[in-house]
Image (cartoon, helix red, strand yellow):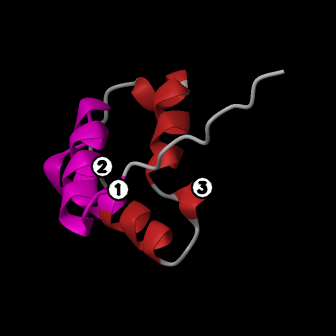
Amino acid sequence: MSQQQPQERTRLTVSQARELAEAVVRKMDYSVEDSAVIAEHIIDAALCGYEYSGLPKLLDAIESKRNLRPRDRKSVV
């Protein structure tokens, strides 16, 4: 029986993580402004110790077909 080697963690600076998050969110058709807000929330969660709500959360969002629909601005009439 062979032992599995533990996976090495990928380490990013905060600015690298923010840049990656914004790029991923932009690919989901969010605006530049919305992407920055979402990325900031994700980075904040990770820095507060909620790793599952950080960058890995984007993987869940990408897999959700509902989140892949194009975005449009809402307006109050």
Q: Residue furthest front?
A: 1
From the viewer's perspective, is the residue at label 2 or at label 1 nearer?
Answer: 1
Circle 3 — which element?
A: helix
Residue type at numbered disc 2: Ala
Residue type at numbered disc 3: Tyr
State the predominant SS element of the stretch in magenta: helix
Circle 2 — which element?
A: helix
- Quarter of the figure that contains the N terminus: top right
Question: Mark 2 — residue?
Answer: 21
Question: Mark 3 — residue?
Answer: 52
Q: Residue furthest left?
A: 32
The numbered dot on residue 53 is: none
Q: How many marks?
A: 3
Question: Mark 1 — residue?
Answer: 11
Q: Position of residue 17 (x, y in %)?
A: 28, 56
User: Cβ–Cβ below 8 Å for labels 2 and 3?
Assistant: no
Residue type at numbered disc 1: Arg
Span colored in magenta: 11-39
- Residue in the image at 18% along x and 57% along y: 33
Q: Position of residue 19 (x, y in %)?
A: 19, 52
